[in-house]
Amino acid sequence: MAGYIHDLRALKVRAGQPSLQELQRRSGIARSTLSDALNPRRRELPRLEICLALVRACGVTPAEEAQWRARWQHIAQAREALRAMPSAGVPDLAVPAESAVPQQLPAAIRHFTGRARELKELDALLGDQMPGCGTVVISAIAGTAGVGKTSLALHFAHRVAHRFPDGQHFANLRGFDPAAAPVDAAGVARGFLDALGVPAPRIPPDSEGQLALYRSRLAGTRTLIVLDNAREAEQVRPLLPGSDRCLVLVTSRNRLSGLIALDGAVPLPLDVLSREEARELLWRRLGPEPVLGHPDAADELIELCARLPLALNIAAARAGDHPGIPLSVWADELRDTRARLDLLAAGDGYADVRAVLSWSYRALAPEAARLFRLLGLHPGPDISAAAAASLAGLPLPRTRTLLDDLHRAHLVTRQGRERYSFHDLLRAYAIEQIDAHDSTGVQSESTLRMLDHYLHTAYRAGSLAYADEASWPPLDLAERAVGVTPEVLTDRQQSLGWYRDEQTVLDQTVARARQEGFDNHAWQLAGTQVSYLLKSGLWQQWQQVSELALAAAERTGELDRQAHAHRWLGQVHRSQGRQPEAHIELRRAFDLFGQVGDRTRQGRTQIDIAIAYGEEHAYVEAIAEACLALELFEAVDDPSGQATALNSIGWYLTLRGEPRKALPYCRRALELSRACGNLPAQSSTLDSIGFIHHHLGEYHEALPAYLESLQLRQAIGDYFLQAEIHTHIGDTYLALGDTLAARRSWRASLDILDDLQHRDADAVRARLDRHQDKSS
């Protein structure tokens, strides 16, 4: 019987040492009755209803409650049997106090899934145990709320419990419990001493004495200690035994850097499940048919739950309660971001995604909490430190410090050196919090700062990379809002790198600007991207951004901006082989530029129309349009435009079969483009000159022109156009009899075209198939 009470007291420790007043509130049982039931000197078994109320107040699962009930009944029946024996006394059925072996681990999770890498790292810790080194082995398992830290710790602890014959201790330190303060180390030590069977009179009354006795009792033992849900290293450090044969597993939502730095803890960061692990979890919970029979619905459900184990388990439990309903129905419900957190709750604080996220959020300092909320306004998928500083209107150094705070609390994930992200459920929670705590005005000001950050940085990047190109539109930027911190960009290559890093964010930001009514920002952000999208061959993104720009321009009624957007769309359609749609958009742009008196842009658009005709092999029409464009450029004295038009005339004359007639046009184009420093025009013209020499059979003259053209394209970052030049170089090498060099060039072209999923890839692949490498 004393063993039963002992374990009740240990359960209270595991639950975080709630006070008798708190237990009374949870159970409805008087404090005096609870105190009496937990008295280690008690000789009689407490009544069953008191015991069950007590264990329920300590947060046990229904299965654990059933085990407590069965054990109580077993002890009660045994005592009745002993009383019925004529000469028998009533012995205490417990193990003698001084020989108690604690076995405090809660039940392991039935549906534990995956984590093979993490379990392997934990296994390696046992191999690190070296008797005589005097150092306890510690693992600090850290991760965001609901990611399965406790599940992993308990799964591993049960798996290796047999290697620790002197006992297994468990304590919930309640580092983030909203209903109770974190448990102090001395309180945990007192509970562990009770579990070790130390009589109450021998336990020192002071904290230091209790901790010293606890460490003494563990000296030389092989004991496993699980300290769950720690808030900070100071809560854990006094509980570390000195024995090098012990293993301590610590879980926390914080990174516990001090424990790692000063106490040698091995960090084990825990991320969301992989897609494969998440599928396995659903399969284990629901069986194979709902998951394997409907893989698309299962995968969507997994992503909507952000691959967070807690969310997936809640969603699986709901689906399991309604076996006839396909997973696609649950996925449909979860698509609504505003309702998602409501749906991922199972009526228990520990089975409610919103609740467990709130425990981490409430532990933040006010300034860090504000930044977390504001991050919900960002469209994602990730954000730079400078963009976060602009969003918050804070200096960059201070923002970095706050981001580090959020990173330590596992409320954001660091992606590289200065980029951060969080999963969609954290984003949904951040949005809820900003709606609850920050006014519409505050949100609008933060959104404006964010848009200004990307607009002014993108304008700087485009000015460095594309300002000398026809695709770069004129932008009259307003002064940026107070508190905006643009990225510092100094050259073309750095600017192209910024575009690459931010491309998905920029796409989302244009959509957000349009959605929030910032039409000026939407159009200007589109304008700062189109050159990069064109040169990179990102056709789908280019079309989406252009459509958003057109919608914004139509809403404001600005004809010049509508003209630009129609031209961008025409270029997209032309590049994708949709020539009828391209002609419609480009003619509309040409007319609108005429209405606003922009003759230079009319000329640029006329070149686009010529290219569209060229794509249709209508070379006579293409030459005619290029000649009209040349007249326009001469009338407005635009030498860069003249170079483009002359090169177009030469190119289409060559395709028409008149390369000798074409060469003077292209040579004049090269002179003009070099004179005005237009690198893209120089590259295009050199490619044309190489093409003309090739068609004239002058292959040794063609090759250097092509190579110089390629060098320029690589320098200015025109990814897609490099493919065409590589193809031409390969054709020239073949004509010179060097098949191996030809194949190398064609392979470089095909790599680019396959990466862009471009229609020209098949023609290059056919070249490679026709001219196999004989040496292989």
Image: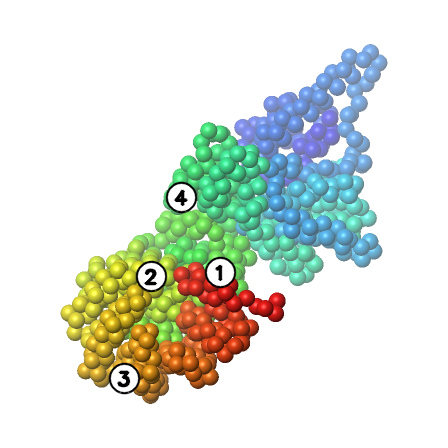
Indicate which disc residue 420 carries.
Answer: 1
**Residue 62 location, quadrant:** top right
SS state under label 3:
helix
Residue 650 appears anywhere in the view: yes
**Local crowd at mark 3 within 10 Å, few (<14), some, or many (≥20)?**
some
**Residue 504 location, quadrant:** bottom left
Q: Residue at x 71, y 29 (%)?
A: 4
Indicate which disc residue 639 carries.
Answer: 3
Q: Name the residue under label 2.
A: 577
Q: Which amino acid does label 3 sit on?
A: Pro
- Cα–Cα gap, marks 2 and 4: 35 Å
Disc on the earlier residue, 3 or 4: 4
**Foreground pick, 150 / 364:** 150
Indicate which disc residue 335 carries.
Answer: 4
Q: What residue type is labelled 2?
A: Gly
Disc on the earlier residue, 1 or 3: 1
